[in-house]
Amino acid sequence: MGLVERLNSSPFPKKHGVSFCSFDGRQSQTFTFADRESSSAAQTWQVLRSEFDQLLWNTAHSHGAECRERTRVTRLLGDQYGVQGAVIQDAEGNLAEIQAQVVVDATGQHSLVGEKLGLPVTEHSPERSALWGYYENAYRDAGQDAATTHIFRSRDRRQWFWYVPLRDNVVSVGVVGAADHLLQGRGRPATVFEEELVECPIVLERLVDARLLGELRASGPLQSISRPGAGPGWVLVGDALATLDPVFCSGVSLALRSGELAADAIVAALSHQQATAAELGQFFARLSARAAAHPSPERGLLQSAVQLPLVFRRPS
Ligand SMILES: Cc1cc2nc3c(=O)[nH]c(=O)nc-3n(C[C@H](O)[C@H](O)[C@H](O)COP(=O)(O)OP(=O)(O)OC[C@H]3O[C@@H](n4cnc5c(N)ncnc54)[C@H](O)[C@@H]3O)c2cc1C
């Protein structure tokens, strides 16, 4: 759809790898994507989500999608045997019904379809939280590593930091830890962040000349979860389908890939008027097979998710 060309001519830094490093920087291991992947997919981008999402939106619009901003889905149409559309509400409060042969739920970890249909959720990790901020003038590596993502473990190995170089001399720095450790009873986020930085001196060193832009941010609970991927008249993609721990930095990639494969399954299903759980669910098996073919952190999660039953089968 021309996205890769647009990304190539964008100012987003080109990312060639990830490095994992101990709290003091003495031990580190860098994974350069090109060592494992010979195609152009060996290079990706460090994007600003707001700009990247706008690019996706504009591209969908220019390819003929009817896009509605500031509009939310309030209700699903259908019965216990299948979804047949949705009720939407615009910013002025106007409601409208949209009939659809297939509803794609891309509403993120809380999954509107999952909530409305009461889909089972499989939890793959304990709850964690993150604190993060954007820093100007933080240390940047040189050359091909200038946009490498760094993952640093804290001294006691219970927390980890991400260090993601973005454009305009900005670096995103965040710490992830158990929700009760990071966010409960420790005061302001800035204080907690400073205390955590002391446990990871290599990050502290990289921030010596840096300036925090705006406020530090705190996430809600982060947890690796998965849900059944399809049922009659609906599919889940992205975080609604499976949410990964951010240490893998692969949530956006998985969201795009699941969307792409789900679209193929929907086109195939509709070509013979079969928007059934089994037809639509085929994308899910393909997604899992791809994850299995390329061993990655997604593999275990997707494979266990794919074993979940497809729900709400229409009685034959
Ligand atoms: C702290 C943190 C750090 C991360 N770091 C990375 C990283 O470095 N790299 C990476 O690839 N991933 C990262 N991720 C994961 C990544 O953010 C997600 O995997 C990704 O955003 C999933 O995309 P999505 O479109 O499925 O869901 P979301 O990005 O959550 O988008 C869902 C959208 O649906 C909308 N929505 C929800 N309900 C409704 C409704 N009823 N009606 C209409 N719209 C609705 C929401 O407003 C939102 O815009 C990180 C996540 C966290 C929490």
Image (tube, rainbow, N blue to C red):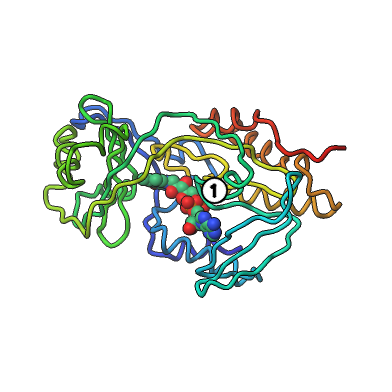
Looking at the image, how many numbered discs can be counted on the residues? 1
Q: Residue at x 66, y 71 (%)?
A: 64
Q: Position of residue 2 (x, y in %)?
A: 58, 64
Disc 1 residue: CB within 8 Å of ligand 1: yes
Rendered position, 49 above or below 220: below
Is residue 106 visible in the rendered image? The answer is yes
Identified by mark 1, the residue type is Ala
Q: Which residue is mark 1?
A: 255
- The x, y position of residue 299, in whole percent, is 55, 31
Residue furthest to the bottom in view is 92
Q: Is residue 119 left or right of residue 166?
A: right
Q: Quadrant of the N terminus?
A: bottom right
Q: Is residue 252 visible?
A: no
The C terminus - image quarter: top right
| Residue at x-position 42% and y-position 42% | 249
Q: Report the side of 307 relative to 126 (left or right).
A: right
- In percent of width and height, residue 30 lies at 35, 34
Locate residue 171 relative to residue 13 in the image: left or right: left
Could you say which is closer to the camera, residue 138 or residue 96?
96
In the figure, 87 relative to 91: above or below? Answer: above
Could you tell me residue 167's position as x and y percent? 32, 59
Residue lying furthest left: 208
Q: Is residue 54 above or below residue 313?
A: below
Q: Please tell me which residue lies in front, 172 or 270.
A: 270
Secondary structure of the residue carrying tag 1 is helix
Dot 1: within a 10 Å radius of its alpha carbon, few (fewer than 14), some, or many (20 or more) residues?
Answer: many
Name the quadrant containing residue 305.
Answer: top right
Relative side of 119 to 55, left or right: right
